[in-house]
Amino acid sequence: MSARADRKWAELARDLEFTRLPELRRQAEGWRNGLAGLTALLAVLGLLKGRDNLDDLPAWARSTATGLLVAAFLLLLTGSLLAVRAAHGVPGPEIVLGGQALRRWTEAEVARVTRALARAAVCCGLGLLLVVGTLALAWSTTEPAAKHLVRLRTVTGEVCGELLSADPQRIVVRGEDGGAATTAVPQGSLVSMEPAASCPAG
């Protein structure tokens, strides 16, 4: 490496002391915007869709999912506030005019901004993990849609299965096992039809 390149790198290293804080502020603004967007998205989804989706869960899963969503929202909100603090600082006393005082304040502020950004990143990661955990819990515990089982008594016997369709000509049912086989019962042969909690095996 040439002496000229060495001098250039040395100059950049010296300049970094004076540009580090503005650069950290710009990074913090990006984190602030991203976290604010995630927090708003989570809040909107929770208000608009959360109640309907959670109603399909068992009671224990509904309570757990609600707790996870609230915790995720709080973490993302905390991360947003930390990013705002890192991007803009906090109101404080005026800096005493003087090179050494300004240098000490800048060094302390760089340390505070770095810590705030690190904590904001942790809050963001944990919040997203809780959202993913909530989705996994919802997917794994959502109860399947109830089948409309019926028991049909006809002049030739009895048919039990999931009601697919009914019209003036026939009633179509499918076996409770959810297979592709269906049975069409003509209305003329129907004696009675009643709901069934389950169908006999076989």
Image: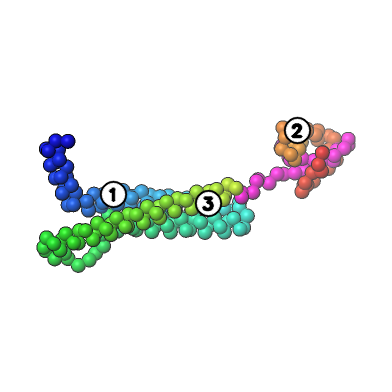
Q: Which mark is residue 134?
A: 3
Residue at disc 3, secondary structure:
helix
* 3D distance between C-alphas at marks 2 and 1: 62 Å
x then y, percent, for residue 103: 16, 59
> Label 1 neighbourhood size at 10 Å, few (<14), some (14-19), many (20+)?
some
Q: Amino acid at mark 3?
A: Thr
User: Which residue is pictured at 56% across the width and 50% down the height?
Assistant: 137
Tell me: 78 left or right of 17. right
Q: Secondary structure at mark 1?
A: helix
* Residue range of the region highlighted in magenta in the rendering: 141-168
Disc 1 marks which residue? Answer: 27
Residue 151 visible in the shown view: no
- Do residues under tags 2 and 1 come within 8 Å of each other at their CB atoms? no
Labelled disc at residue 182:
2
Within 10 Å of disc 2 (Cα), the crowding (few <14, some 14-19, many 20+) is: some
Residue 13 in view here: yes
User: Is 110 in front, or is 181?
Assistant: 110
